[in-house]
Amino acid sequence: MSIIAHLSGTLARKSPTEAVIDVHGVGYSVSISLATYETLPEERGAVTLLTHHHIREDHQQLFGFSSEGERDVFRLLISVSGIGPRTAQTILSGVPARDVTQMIADGNAAGLTSLPGIGKKTAERMILELRDKIGRGDPSPSTLRSASSPSGIRADAVAAIVSLGYSRDKAEIAVTTAMSDLHDEAPTLEQLLKHALKSGAR
């Protein structure tokens, strides 16, 4: 079975959690984090994403990344028992990869338990299993773009959180709370999602 390491082609469609890349007429659906979404070109533009080809007996899924640093952290996370690809993707949508590795390196269990889907035992396991594996790589921060319509951003944020496995009711509450907490008439999608994932969506 072949392993797909990267994809280069035309960006056919994008959302905060998925990119569809047309490679010579074949559309590949790739799950992405918010950090990677913010680096994507406009639809129909040329794009290259590094990928992690997740293979199970009854299922295959591609996860895409704009940098080696983010992919490395993703792979570290899913190597820990109890952290699946969806949880790893959700974590990297709410917190920069470099911040995740810093918390692990510092043994910051309290900080890790603030991440979506991470409880006390999993946080302790992350520190125990990953602390010695973290190198000196410096995942580059994503280049953020400003939001356009507040109502459209709100809808996109709710859809993104639902696609990560949360109920629509919970996603609606999390986004509403985030918008109120941010005290900003037009927060960016990145701001809204990060705040919602850190607080209301847990």
Image (cartoon, helix red, strand yellow):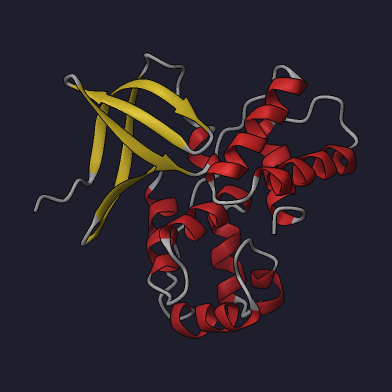
- Residue at the limit of the structure toward the top, as seen here: 44
Question: Looking at the image, which residue is at 43% across and 16% down?
Answer: 43
Horizontal placement of 25 versus 95: left or right? Answer: left
In the rendered image, which quarter is residue 50 located in? top left
Residue 145 showing in the rendered view = yes
Query: Residue 174: image x %, image y %?
Result: 76, 46
In the rendered image, which quarter is residue 158 located in? top right
Query: Residue 85: image x %, image y %?
Result: 42, 58
Residue 138 showing in the rendered view = no
Question: Looking at the image, which residue is at 47% across and 74% down?
Answer: 82
Number of labels in the image equals 0
Horizontal placement of 128 versus 172: left or right? Answer: left
Horizontal placement of 184 versus 126: left or right? Answer: right
Query: Residue 123: image x %, image y %?
Result: 59, 77
Question: Looking at the image, which residue is at 72% across and 29% down?
Answer: 154
What quarter of the picture does the C terminus occupy? Answer: bottom right
Horizontal placement of 200 versus 98: left or right? Answer: right
Q: Nearer the viewer, residue 38 or 106?
A: 38
Q: Nearer the viewer, residue 137 or 51?
A: 51
Name above or below for residue 109 compared with residue 77.
below
Name above or below for residue 123 compared with residue 187.
below
- Residue at the limit of the structure toward the left, as seen here: 1
In the rendered image, which quarter is residue 104 located in? bottom right
Query: Residue 106: image x %, image y %?
Result: 62, 77
Question: Looking at the image, which residue is at 59% across and 43% down?
Answer: 162
